[in-house]
């Protein structure tokens, strides 16, 4: 059965996940990455059961177990005194509840695991997309180094500043949340009073500090979410100021202050998202991951949603039939497959994207008087349970065919 030539722009988590899912279906996939080397910038990340269940089907269960940490619990601690206010067991209880493990993992480790599933030569670095066009038979990609490529399908997995999305839909307007996040890594040996198996949240009146283990608990990833408009750069890699970090958490409890004092380098990321798109695809071109649905980090869903996208996209592109590549019949079937992918994924990711704006650890903000009122932990778990229970591949065979856009 003929398979499609598929070009993926962007070799971040979403781009590699797409390449893995599509090569598993036998397609010819090339990933074009503008960076000179295949690397991933960042610290730790959450890998929730809805993403983990798919990665395990791809054969990454052992690798995730070796490189990730399964937190035994999430604890909410009082910002000023440090007392434990609430504890939500995770670990085996989370596995039993949602059908797959919850991991905290270093971004570089997951990136390497995904890259390790790809055939040699799948990723081409130093390939910055300059423009693309569709001549009715193939998509032609032109790169900044003067090289060109033709493909039957183009997938824009090039992140929040996606050039593919901009070409399809024009410039967008970033929506600033009014917050930014300090983030980075701390060796747990430098903060021996903090556990290496627990997801910690200190919820203050105006700011929050999160810390969770990666690399077997040898390191803690920290994320300090603070209000203010002075930091407006939407960048994962922009350096943050250590004095500003210390000032934001001055007066907090001794655990948070010891964590901040152990930081040697921090990045500061202004928190933006975008309004959901009304459509993703045009002809044989579509979007995936942050390029399709950039969202705030409060549900910890950025990577897991991209993995879900990849699995669903690969499912529908597996049904192209015996049409000749480049033929009108193949083009029609590709457009139909991308339509069905979007019809399945866009309503779901829109709900997750919009829910991230006021969900997650934001619900743990103390009430008047300084205490965390009610039972916000139950509300937080309820917020994410429908997302983490979701199996993106379940029921796909029953999705009715639909016309292309």
Image (cartoon, rainbow, N blue to C red):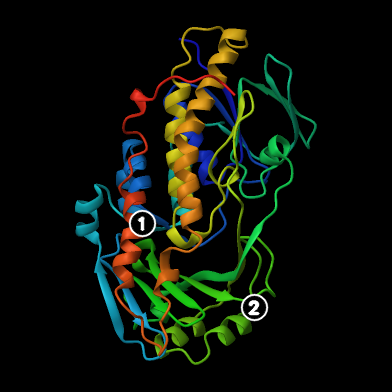
Q: Residues within 10 Å of mark 1 (few under 14, many from 20)?
A: some
The kind of secondary structure element at disc 1 is: helix
Residue 384 marker:
1
Q: In this view, does 312 lie above or below 85?
A: above
Residue 262 percent location from the top left of the image: 49, 81
Binning the other alpha carbons within 10 Å of mark 2 as few (below 14), some (14 to 19) or many (20 upward) gives some
User: Where does the image place residue 12, in percent across and percent down from the top left?
Assistant: 56, 46
Q: What's the mark number on residue 241?
A: 2
Q: Residue 139 in the image: state x and y as whole percent.
A: 68, 22
Nearest to viewer (mark 1 / mark 2): 1
Residue 333 badge: none
Q: Is any atom of residue 126 visible in this view?
A: no
> Is residue 370 visible to us here?
yes
Residue at 57% in and 57% down: 41
Q: How far apart are marks 1 and 2 (CA)?
A: 32 Å
Q: Residue at x 36, y 59 (%)?
A: 383
Q: In this view, does 180 lie above or below 49?
A: below
**Of the pair 315 and 174, the residue shown nearer to us:** 174
Q: Which residue is drawn at 51% across and 80% down?
A: 206
Choose between 396 and 233: the one closer to the eye. 396
46 relative position to 94: left or right? right
Mark 2 secondary-structure assignment: loop
Total marks drawn?
Answer: 2
């Amino acid at each position: 059965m003929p398979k499609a030539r598929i070009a993926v722009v962007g070799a971040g988590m979403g781009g590699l996940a797409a390449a893995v899912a599509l090569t598993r279906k036998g397609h010819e996939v090339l990933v074009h990455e503008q960076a000179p080397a295949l690397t991933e910038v960042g610290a730790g990340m959450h890998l929730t059961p809805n993403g983990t269940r798919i990665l395990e089907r791809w054969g990454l269960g052992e690798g995730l177990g070796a490189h990730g940490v399964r937190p035994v619990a999430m604890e909410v601690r009082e910002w000023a005194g440090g007392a434990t206010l609430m504890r939500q067991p995770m670990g085996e209880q989370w596995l039993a509840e949602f059908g797959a493990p919850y991991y905290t993992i270093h971004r570089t480790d997951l990136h390497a695991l995904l890259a390790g599933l790809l055939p040699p030569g799948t990723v081409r670095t130093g390939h910055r997309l300059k423009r693309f066009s569709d001549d009715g038979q193939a998509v032609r990609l032109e790169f900044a180094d003067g090289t060109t490529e033709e493909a039957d399908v183009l997938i824009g997995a090039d992140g929040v500043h996606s050039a593919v999305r901009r070409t399809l839909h024009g410039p967008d307007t970033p929506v600033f949340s009014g917050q930014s996040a300090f983030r980075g890594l701390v060796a747990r040996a430098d903060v021996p009073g903090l556990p290496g198996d627990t997801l910690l949240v200190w919820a203050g009146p105006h700011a929050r500090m999160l810390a969770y283990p990666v690399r077997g608990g040898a390191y803690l990833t920290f994320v300090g979410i603070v209000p203010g408009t002075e930091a407006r750069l939407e960048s994962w890699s922009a350096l943050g100021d250590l004095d500003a970090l210390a000032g934001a958490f001055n007066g907090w409890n001794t655990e948070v202050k010891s964590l901040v004092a152990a930081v040697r380098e921090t990045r500061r990321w202004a928190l933006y998202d975008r309004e959901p798109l009304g459509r993703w695809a045009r002809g044989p071109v579509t979007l995936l991951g942050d390029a399709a649905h950039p969202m705030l980090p409060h549900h910890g869903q950025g990577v897991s949603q991209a993995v879900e996208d990849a699995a669903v996209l690969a499912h529908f592109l597996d049904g192209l039939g015996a049409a000749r590549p480049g033929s009108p019949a193949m083009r029609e079937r590709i457009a139909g497959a991308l339509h069905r992918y979007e019809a399945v994924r866009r309503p779901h990711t829109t709900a997750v994207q919009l829910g991230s704006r006021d969900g997650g650890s934001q619900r743990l903000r103390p009430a008047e008087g300084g205490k965390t009122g009610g039972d916000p932990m139950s509300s937080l778990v309820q917020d994410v349970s429908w997302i983490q229970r979701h199996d993106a591949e379940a029921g796909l065979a029953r999705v009715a065919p639909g016309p292309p856009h």
